[in-house]
Image (spheres, grey):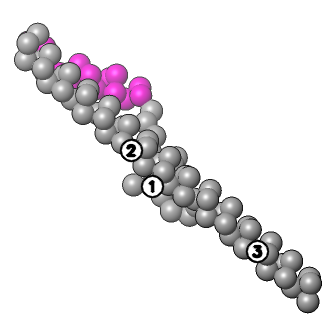
Amino acid sequence: MDNNNSLASLSKAVEAIKTAILQSQERAAKGVNVTQLSLYFSIGRFVSINSRLQKWGMVNEKFQPLIGEIQSLSATKLKIGNNDVE
């Protein structure tokens, strides 16, 4: 009987740890998403303002080669358990 209680207790502990890890991963992924959205908004605002003020012209053609060099965090790189982060 004591062995069954120990196993049940261990099982609950493992489940609690797993839940804590998954919740932490989810919070981290959401934080990354918020940070990325803020960055993209700031970049868009910067480019929009400066392209008008500085008369940059076709910004897309100038930035496209640079954008291809930047590797972003994709959903496949941020995984929570078996679920991809979107």
| Residue reaching furthest to the top | 54
Q: Is residue 26 left or right of residue 55?
A: right
Specify the quadrant that holds the N terminus. bottom right
> Which callout, 1 or 2, points at the residue further toward the start of the chain?
2
| Residue at (36% x, 42% y) in the render | 34
Q: Which residues are magenta?
A: 55-70
In this view of the protein, which residue sits in the foreground, 73 or 57?
73
Residue 80 at least partly seen: no
To which quarter of the image does residue 7 belong?
A: bottom right
Q: Is residue 17 above or below residue 74?
A: below
| Element type at mark 3 | helix
Residue 43 counted in the magenta span: no
> Where residue 59 appears, x then y in whole percent?
17, 21
| Residue at (56% x, 52% y) in the render | 24
Tag of residue 85: 1
| Residue at (37% x, 29% y) in the render | 68
To which quarter of the image does residue 31 belong?
A: top left
Q: Is residue 4 left or right of residue 49?
A: right
> Which callout, 1 or 3, points at the residue further toward the start of the chain?
3
> Which callout, 3 or 2, points at the residue further toward the start of the chain?
3
In this view of the protein, which residue sits in the foreground, 22 or 45?
22
Q: Is residue 60 above or below residue 82?
A: above
| Residue at (86% x, 77% y) in the render | 6
Tag of residue 33: 2
Q: Are marks 1 and 2 in contact (CB under 8 Å)?
A: yes
User: Gap in Å between the C-alphas at discs 3 and 2?
Assistant: 33 Å
> Where residue 82 appears, x then y in whole percent?
56, 64
| Element type at mark 2 | helix
Q: Are marks 1 and 3 in contact (CB under 8 Å)?
A: no
Tag of residue 11: 3
> Where residue 22 appears, x then y in whole percent?
58, 59
